[in-house]
Image: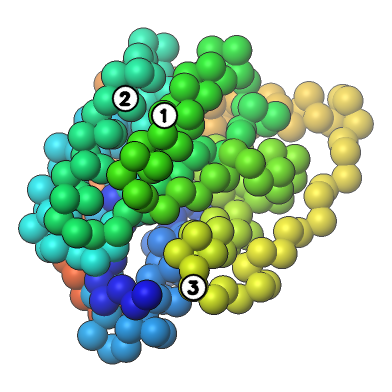
């Protein structure tokens, strides 16, 4: 099947952090997917990316659903809820109920939908006992929603490359590395039945295990550089995406998106 327009909805995962273009803006798996789809669709292919880092599910729905429906795309990707499950007070069942309604609305327009089961980050982030059960509920619910509405499901949780290889993740341990984004793009295109560059599936060699003392030092540096600022923003009621606007707010050909504002806080 050939899609002539694609809208990406979501948060930092879909915005493309931390896969940077030379100018410091982010590419990510969605840009890679759109570029590949445009090869088949031709120069009239339109791509919009409404995703903004730090967005909770309610914000994704409130800010992005109406513009998405108004653009009447052939294909929509939806990935949200990951930021919610990291919060202390989150009801994953309520998240699933909201997602179900959104996917139903999008599918009612005739658009195809891509959904994701989130990758397992428990091996390199603290707090697994808290967010692990929530992620399990969310992933299970996403699978059921995809089956019920006939959406394309990309199961990143089942991909061991994301679970066991730190090279798939950026230094903050939360966002994907360029290699991670390429692998997600390959999984998406495979789910859509579109031919993919096999190099995107290549997994870099796993870093050699660190000695215990060196590993603890790395953990402390990570906590100071990434965890502490995240906690500070939560306490202040701020988000890394407060000053960010969508990088591609309207359907446009690949390579012709307008510039958007960037946050002074890159996280």
Q: Earlier in the sequence, mark 2 or mark 3?
A: 2
Q: Secondary structure at mark 2?
A: helix
Q: Quick one: label 3, few (<14), some, or many (20+) residues within 10 Å?
A: some
Q: Disc 3 marks which residue?
A: 194
Q: Dot 2, crowdedness within 10 Å: few (<14), some or many (≥20)?
A: many
Label whose residue precedes the other's in the sequence (1 or 3): 1
Residue 48 in which image quadrant = bottom left
* SS at badge 1: helix
Relative to 231, residue 102 above or below:
below
Q: Is the residue under label 3 in contact with that under label 2 (CB below 8 Å)?
A: no
Left or right, 12 with reference to 102? right
Please determine whether, in this image, residue 145 is positioned above or below residue 37.
above
Tell me the residue at 60%/59% (across/down).
183
Residue at 41% across, 85% down: 39
Give me the C-alpha separation between circle 2 and circle 1.
9 Å
Q: Is residue 89 above or below residue 168?
A: above
Foreground disc of the pair 2, 3: 3
Q: Nearer the viewer, residue 216 or 119?
A: 119
Apparent side of residue 91 relative to residue 123 in the rendered image (left or right):
left
Distance between mark 2 and mark 3 Cα atoms: 30 Å
Q: Whole-percent x and y of residue 14?
A: 39, 51
Residue 257 visible somewhere in the drawing: no
Q: Nearer the viewer, mark 2 or mark 1?
A: 1
Which tag, 2 or 1, sits closer to the chain's start? 2
Rendered location of residue 22, percent (x, y): 48, 71
CB atoms of marks 2 and 1 within 8 Å: yes
Which image quarter is the C terminus in?
Answer: top left
* Mark pair 1, 3: CA separation: 26 Å
* Residue located 81% across and 30% down the image: 215
Which residue lies under the disc numbered 2? Answer: 95
Element carrying mark 3: loop
Residue matched to label 1: 141
């Amino acid at each position: 099947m050939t899609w002539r327009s694609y809208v990406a909805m979501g948060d930092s995962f879909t915005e493309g952090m931390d896969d940077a273009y030379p100018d410091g803006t982010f590419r990510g798996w969605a840009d890679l997917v759109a570029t590949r789809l445009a090869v088949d669709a031709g120069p009239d292919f339109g791509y919009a990316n409404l995703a903004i880092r730090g967005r909770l599910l309610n914000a994704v729905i409130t800010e992005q659903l109406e513009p998405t429906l108004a653009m009447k795309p052939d294909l929509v990707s939806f990935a949200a809820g990951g930021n919610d499950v990291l919060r202390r007070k989150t009801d994953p069942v309520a998240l699933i109920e909201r997602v179900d309604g959104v996917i139903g609305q999008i599918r009612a327009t005739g658009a195809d939908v891509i959904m994701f089961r989130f990758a397992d980050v428990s091996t390199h982030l603290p707090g697994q006992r808290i967010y692990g059960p929530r992620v399990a509920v969310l992933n299970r619910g996403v699978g059921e929603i995809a089956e019920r509405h006939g959406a394309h499901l990309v199961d990143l949780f089942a991909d061991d490359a994301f679970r066991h290889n730190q090279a798939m993740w950026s230094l903050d341990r939360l966002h994907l590395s360029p290699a991670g984004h390429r692998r997600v793009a390959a999984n998406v295109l495979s789910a859509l039945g579109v031919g993919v560059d096999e190099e995107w599936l290549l997994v870099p060699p796993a870093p050699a295990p660190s000695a215990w003392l060196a590993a603890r030092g790395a953990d402390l540096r990570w906590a100071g550089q990434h965890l502490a600022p995240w906690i500070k923003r939560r306490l202040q009621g701020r988000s890394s995406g407060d000053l960010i606007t969508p990088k591609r707010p309207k359907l446009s050909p690949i390579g012709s998106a307008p510039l958007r504002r960037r946050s002074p806080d890159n996280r």
